[in-house]
């Protein structure tokens, strides 16, 4: 027979008197207050009393059932493992294509493309602002020729492609679609994701071009176009990853990501889309940090919150609209240049938290990324980390193995409550766009990052190999170096593409992009026509710059 609350409370009191008090007399605990990275107090122990009022069916339920706390699929990894992605891209398209083939040959199951800064910012490699940045932090893509080279030999109808691109997401998607069409692959056979989350760029990352409201127009055009033409494509990956990398807490990552998600849904509805026409193709992208249990609880709270927001706030009727599907990536900001082998352990713990939290796809960072783009060997080791968890740990044999843990369920509830408090504040400001324009999210993240750094400097927070246990550092010898000749090669290539194309067709298609931006017509068809006519990424971005302008952040930041 189950113990009642009074019996448990009496037993707890006796335990504290007979066991805890003598132990504390013999020696104090390591610190007076234990907290998660979000400042949530962590008690000495958790028991049924911490879940007073907890309703199994309403708050937890079964895997694959609303509110999806325990996962979006009833069998989860017993049926199919998560997609294993390794984020890769550097130099030019040929270099990156070789790395993709290498990773696929070694068991990677999804393509994840990193683009260089000029590509992200809508600048061709021969633009003066691109100097010194071409191919440095990702692959340089300026034309249809580049995209064809990047995807050479990859079966587009059998892979899932993820592109980390935001301000120029419409152009990169258009290039991908144009390559597929040239190969005779129907758009309904394509699976993948464009990040396309511009709001977090204003908050945390900075690779924006246009002001928020113009950017939202482009995003809703993508939603509308893809819902009709590319039905299996995820048109946005609403990203908390970069919010966390900028220094936010887990609660802030969750709250600001969901607030952005709400803003995208509202913009789509305002543009005339129906909630169940597009919501099932929304996806999310989260960070996995070091606080193991808080990260697992964060993912569970995220699913439950999003399901309730979609059902109660937006009146979604299709359960697929309520399911939060997410990609996770281990935390780049936790990687250290000192004692890089320690990063293997950090990444393993973070990856395990993502799996226990129910991620649909996962990227594991490489141990040397605090120093440079990953070497081939370290990228392979990062992939092997996922494979070891998948095939040797057996944590995938049951769904939500930590479900019902007194601590985990309490932490999930607390994260949900604190996130709701943030969402209410943002709603009171007029929503995410207004909050960003006022600098609210930016200031909250700055304050959290400052507090975190202060903890490291005072050694309240130990970072192994950085502020403690510092002996034994040897720099790795196989750091990847991007060939500086890549920049001139890309500059010459884009110049040749412009010279060899049908100039009248290129100019007409470019004018059509600008006119669509002015008239309010959907931008995707003319952008696709433009890339087919060999118009470059920078030229298309400039056409929209002439209409939408460029964003300038608030002065008070």
Image (spheres, rainbow, N blue to C red):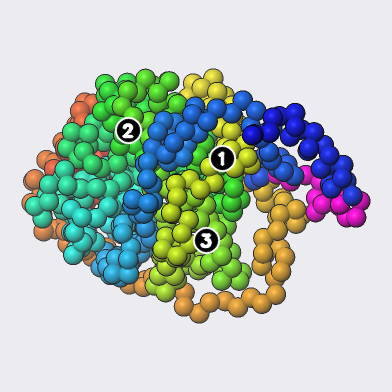
Distance, label 3 to label 1, CA atoms, is 26 Å
Which badge, 2 or 1, comes first in the chain's sequence?
2
| Residue shown at the point (47%, 33%) measured from the top left | 61
Mark 1, residue position:
404
Task: Give the SS element for disc 3.
Answer: helix
**Position in image of residue 479 (x %, y %):** 47, 74
516 over 391 or under it: above or below = above
**Position in image of residue 119 (x %, y %):** 33, 53
Crowding near the residue tagged with mark 1, few <14, some 14–19, many ≥20 C-alpha atoms within 10 Å: some
Mark 2, residue position:
320
Distance, label 2 to label 3, CA atoms, is 31 Å
Q: Quadrant of the C terminus?
A: top right
From which residue to which does the magenta span run? 23-35
Front one among 375 and 70: 70
Task: Give the SS element for disc 1.
Answer: loop
**Position in image of residue 53 (x %, y %):** 61, 25
From the viewer's perspective, is the residue at label 2 or at label 3 nearer?
2
| Residue shown at the point (78%, 38%) measured from the top left | 12
- Would you say residue 134 is visible in this rendering? no
Q: Quadrant of residue 342?
A: bottom right
């Amino acid at each position: 027979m189950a113990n009642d609350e009074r019996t448990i409370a009496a037993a707890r009191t006796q335990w504290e008197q007979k066991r805890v008090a003598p132990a504390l007399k013999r020696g104090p605990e390591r610190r007076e207050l234990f907290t998660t990275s979000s400042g949530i107090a962590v008690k000495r122990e958790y028991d049924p009393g911490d879940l007073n009022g907890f309703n199994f069916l309403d708050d937890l339920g079964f895997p694959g059932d609303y509110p999806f706390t325990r996962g979006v699929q009833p069998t989860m990894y017993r049926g199919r493992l998560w997609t294993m992605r390794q984020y890769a891209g550097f130099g030019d398209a040929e270099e990156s294509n070789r790395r993709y083939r290498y990773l696929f040959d070694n068991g990677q199951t999804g393509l994840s493309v990193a683009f260089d800064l000029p590509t992200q910012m809508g600048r061709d490699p021969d633009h003066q602002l691109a100097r010194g940045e071409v191919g440095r932090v990702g692959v340089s893509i300026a034309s249809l020729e580049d995209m064809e080279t990047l995807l050479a030999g990859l079966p587009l109808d059998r892979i899932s492609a993820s592109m980390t691109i935001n301000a120029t997401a419409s152009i990169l998607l258009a290039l991908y679609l144009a390559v597929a069409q040239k190969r005779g692959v129907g758009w309904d056979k394509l699976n993948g994701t464009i990040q396309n989350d511009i709001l977090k760029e204003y908050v945390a990352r900075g690779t924006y071009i246009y002001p928020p409201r113009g950017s939202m127009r482009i995003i809703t055009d993508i939603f509308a176009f893809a819902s009709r033409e590319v039905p299996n494509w995820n048109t946005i990956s609403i990203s908390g990853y970069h919010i966390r990398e900028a220094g936010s807490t887990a609660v802030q990552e969750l709250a600001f990501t969901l607030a952005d998600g709400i803003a995208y849904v509202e913009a789509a509805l305002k543009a005339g889309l129906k909630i169940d026409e597009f919501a099932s193709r929304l996806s999310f992208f989260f960070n996995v940090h070091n606080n193991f249990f808080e990260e697992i609880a964060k993912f569970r709270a995220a699913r439950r919150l999003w399901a309730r927001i979609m059902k109660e706030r937006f009146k979604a009727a299709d359960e697929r609209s309520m399911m939060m599907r997410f990609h996770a990536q281990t935390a780049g900001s936790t990687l250290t240049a000192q004692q890089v082998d320690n990063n293997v352990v950090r990444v393993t713990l973070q990856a395990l938290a993502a799996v226990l939290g129910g991620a649909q796809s996962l990227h594991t960072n490489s141990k040397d990324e605090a120093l440079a783009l990953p070497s081939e060997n370290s990228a392979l080791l990062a992939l092997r980390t996922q494979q070891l968890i998948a095939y040797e740990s057996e944590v995938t044999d049951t769904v939500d193995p930590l479900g019902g843990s007194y601590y985990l369920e309490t932490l999930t509830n607390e994260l949900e409550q604190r996130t709701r408090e943030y969402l209410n504040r943002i709603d009171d400001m007029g929503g995410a766009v207004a909050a960003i324009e006022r600098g609210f999210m930016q200031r909250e993240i700055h304050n959290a990052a400052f507090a975190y750094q202060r903890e490291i400097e005072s050694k309240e927070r130990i970072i192994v190999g950085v502020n403690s246990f510092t002996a034994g550092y040897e720099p790795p010898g196989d750091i990847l170096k991007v060939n500086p000749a890549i920049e001139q090669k890309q500059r010459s290539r884009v110049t040749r593409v412009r010279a060899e194309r049908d100039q009248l067709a290129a100019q007409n298609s470019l004018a059509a992009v600008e006119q669509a931006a002015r008239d309010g017509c959907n931008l995707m068809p003319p952008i696709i026509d433009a890339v087919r006519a060999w118009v470059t990424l920078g030229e298309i971005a400039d056409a929209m710059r002439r209409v939408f302008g460029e964003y300038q952040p608030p002065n008070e930041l």
